[in-house]
């Protein structure tokens, strides 16, 4: 008779003394419970009802015990076993290997989790060695390397795996009283020992290119003796990159006084400061190079003859059916990238259905996009793709069905185009078109203009009001989308604090790609092929009811999105990605003519979101962030002379020249990293001694 859930958990935690078991339930929304270890032994009748309550969910547990209600790695107290997720690799190799498993759990047909129980559970100081052994075990047995972090969650034996049809009972296939010490695994082949900089490709070619910087190679080679200012410069460069945090820790461990907490504090601080420039770095360490970039982070974006970095290669296989056919046809005859046509199409489609389709969710998202095509230069044909996409939709639909505006100079102008509330046309759907996004930025930064707040408000909702002594604007039931283009260089330097303060940049969906010179004189696209696609689009839209459809989300789709959502690192680049995820679900479902959000759609959306995260990192405006670093340094210098009240400190650093965003970010960063202290009684700021 196979062991029950409680018997397995009592066995795995037999040697543990303290901590909470983190139970997680995915599907239909993620749930998390923290159960004190003593409850498992002293009151098991209270444990079982928790699992029963979530039996319709996919059930997991963090094998490592936690301190309090914190499921992160930092809260780990004890680790009772080593494990491998074979993920379809043969179990026979484990059975025939030198380390007989303590337990084997079948999670779905032919897929197994293998455990090696520890005689003495590892504590939090041994997380590093444990993760090293987990990686070595995964490599040795061809397991899943993504399941080698100490905070990993695994399926709970005795629960149901709802990913399979029918649901599969997660079963303990064997459980033996075999225990090991960590030292028993010393004979495992060592991980390949290479310099940290050479291991970077696993985080993407972008990071590899940045690590070509002579200064960063110096930080790698001389990590044991690296002066603090040089070390911090390295942190600012790597902190925002995918995989950068882990790399910073790897580079820092070579220093004798390395502290994980202090390193994390500096990483957090650096996110506000932004990457140091090459000019500043050269004042710290003479690299003797002239790479033609402002900062090492720009090495990944420096124009080359090769394609874009693999980390940001557009995942075109995620977009099919009508949008894919449109992009295939037009990119065959024109030089604009496939991705520009695909997302131009999805942006226009999303606006057309924005009042007719949503998700079966309380927040009822609308499928409207603020899309910006980014290219190196005019050779990428950004505006050409927008012009052709808009023309396709205009010709496909009856006059006025697809409403666009080629630029608007003010909120008053926007109101005139849309018509004030009370007019007959409702809802008011409009797609703003900008061949050069900079023209919108220029108009929106005019003193006293309300264009930016209006457009920003219409990203979130459908209403905008503004009243002054001379005039007022009252717009309601507005469904606004944006389709624009910009060069990378202009995009990196045109933003002002007003856009950053209001969070406009993270409301943009960036499509970065590069066109190719293929046709000196492009041939005409066959008329019949265009007309065929336009008829398909018309049929597509006719099938969508006029009354709003609420698309149901399958449980497997929820689980796919849950796993992405709860593993997403919070940071400046991930803001509103979840919002775009929900919007893209609707658009892709409409494009695929699906009546629900399937797991396939959810996976496509998650892939696109991961790509978007990389694009945002690559296209982050460096100059805007450097103002924060300047503000921090001015605050330090002002406070070096003694404590100051808020108003006097602001006066001395000329905060109005840099804007409220730079001031607030600078002072908050310094307080958070404990460089500056605010005395509540005296109402003064001081440098920490």
Image: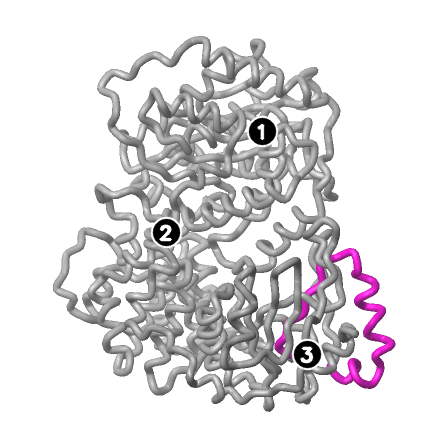
Residues at marks 2 and 3, CA–CA distance in whole angstroms: 58 Å
The structure residue drawn at horizontal position 42% and vertical position 62%, both measured from the top left corner, is: 271
Whole-percent x, y for residue 273 in the image: 39, 62
Whole-percent x, y for residue 99 in the image: 52, 81
Locate residue 63 relative to residue 202 in the image: left or right.
right
Q: Is residue 620 visible?
A: no
Magenta region, residue range: 37-65
Residues at marks 1 and 3, CA–CA distance in whole angstroms: 49 Å
Which mark, by number, is residue 624?
2
For label 1, the SS is helix
Give the mark nearest the N terminus, 2 or 1: 1
The structure residue drawn at horizontal position 42% and vertical position 48%, both measured from the top left corner, is: 616
Quarter of image, res 70: bottom right
Q: Nearer the viewer, mark 1 or mark 3?
A: 3
Question: Residue tagged by mark 1?
Answer: 591
Locate residue 47 relative to residue 637 in the image: left or right.
right
Whole-percent x, y for residue 33 in the image: 73, 69
Locate residue 23 relative to residue 620 in the image: left or right.
right
Give the mark nearest the N terminus, 1 or 3: 3
Whole-percent x, y for residue 402 in the image: 56, 18
- Which of these two is toward me, 441 or 160? 160
Question: Residue tagged by mark 3?
Answer: 175
- Total of numbered circles in the picture? 3
């Amino acid at each position: 008779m196979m062991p029950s859930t409680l018997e397995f958990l009592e066995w795995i935690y037999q040697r543990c003394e303290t901590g909470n078991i983190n139970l997680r339930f995915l599907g239909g929304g993620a749930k998390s419970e923290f159960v004190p270890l003593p409850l498992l032994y002293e009151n098991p009748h209270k444990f079982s009802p928790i699992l029963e309550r979530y039996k319709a969910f996919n059930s997991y547990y963090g094998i490592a015990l936690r301190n309090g209600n914190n499921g992160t790695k930092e809260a780990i107290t004890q680790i009772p076993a080593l494990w491998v997720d074979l993920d379809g690799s043969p179990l026979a190799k484990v059975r025939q290997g030198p380390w007989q498993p303590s337990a084997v759990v079948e999670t779905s047909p032919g897929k197994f989790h293998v455990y090696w129980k520890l005689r003495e559970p590892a504590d939090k100081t041994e997380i590093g060695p444990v993760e090293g052994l987990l990686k070595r075990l995964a490599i040795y047995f061809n397991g899943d390397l993504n399941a080698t972090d100490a905070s990993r969650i695994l399926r709970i034996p005795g629960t149901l795996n709802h990913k399979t049809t029918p649901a599969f009972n997660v079963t303990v296939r064997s459980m033996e009283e075999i225990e090991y010490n960590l030292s028993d695994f010393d004979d495992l082949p060592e991980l390949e020992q290479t310099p940290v900089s050479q291991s970077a490709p696993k985080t993407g070619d972008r990071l590899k290119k940045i690590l070509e910087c002579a200064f960063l190679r110096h930080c790698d080679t001389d990590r044991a003796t690296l002066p603090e200012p040089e070390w911090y410069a390295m942190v600012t460069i790597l902190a925002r990159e995918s995989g950068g945090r882990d790399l910073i820790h790897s580079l820092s461990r070579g220093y004798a006084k390395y502290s994980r907490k202090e390193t994390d504090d500096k990483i957090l601080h650096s996110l506000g400061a932004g990457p140091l420039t090459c000019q500043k770095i050269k004042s710290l360490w003479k690299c003797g190079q002239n790479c033609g970039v402002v900062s090492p982070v720009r090495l990944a974006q420096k124009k080359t003859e090769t394609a874009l970095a693999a980390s940001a290669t557009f995942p075109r296989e995620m977009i099919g059916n009508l949008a894919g056919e449109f992009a295939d046809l037009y990119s065959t005859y024109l030089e604009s990238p496939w991705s520009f046509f695909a997302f131009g199409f999805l942006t226009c489609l999303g606006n057309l259905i924005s009042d007719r389709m949503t998700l079966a969710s309380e927040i009822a998202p609308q499928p409207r996009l603020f899309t910006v095509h980014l290219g190196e230069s005019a050779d990428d044909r950004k505006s050409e793709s927008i012009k052709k996409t808009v023309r396709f939709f205009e010709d496909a639909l009856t006059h006025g069905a697809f409403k666009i505006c080629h630029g608007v100079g003010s909120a008053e102008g926007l109101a005139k185009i849309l018509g004030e509330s009370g007019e007959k046309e409702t809802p008011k759907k409009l797609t703003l078109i900008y061949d050069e996004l900079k023209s919108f930025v220029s108009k929106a930064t005019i003193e006293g203009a309300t264009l930016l707040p209006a457009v920003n408000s219409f990203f979130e909702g459908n209403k905008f009001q503004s009243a002054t002594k001379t005039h007022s604007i009252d717009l309601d039931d507005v469904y606004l989308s944006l389709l624009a283009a910009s060069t990378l260089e202009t995009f990196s330097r045109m933003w002002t604090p007003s856009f950053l303060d209001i969070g406009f940049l993270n409301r943009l969906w960036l499509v970065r790609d590069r066109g190719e010179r293929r046709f000196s004189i492009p041939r005409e696209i066959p008329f019949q092929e265009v007309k065929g696609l336009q008829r398909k689009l018309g049929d597509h839209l006719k099938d969508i009811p006029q009354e709003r459809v609420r698309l149901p989300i399958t449980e497997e789709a929820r689980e796919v999105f849950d796993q992405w959502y709860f593993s997403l690192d919070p940071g400046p680049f991930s803001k509103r990605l979840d919002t775009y995820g929900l919007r893209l679900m609707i658009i892709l479902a409409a494009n695929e003519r699906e009546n629900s959000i399937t797991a396939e759609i959810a996976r496509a959306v998650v892939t696109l979101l991961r790509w978007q995260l990389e694009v945002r990192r690559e296209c982050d405006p460096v100059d805007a962030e450097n103002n924060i670093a300047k503000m921090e340094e001015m605050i330090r210098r002002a406070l070096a002379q003694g404590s100051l009240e808020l108003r006097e400190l602001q006066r001395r650093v000329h905060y109005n020249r840099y804007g409220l965003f730079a001031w607030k970010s600078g002072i908050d960063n310094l307080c958070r990293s404990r460089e500056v202290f605010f005395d509540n009684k005296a109402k003064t700021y001081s440098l920490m001694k």
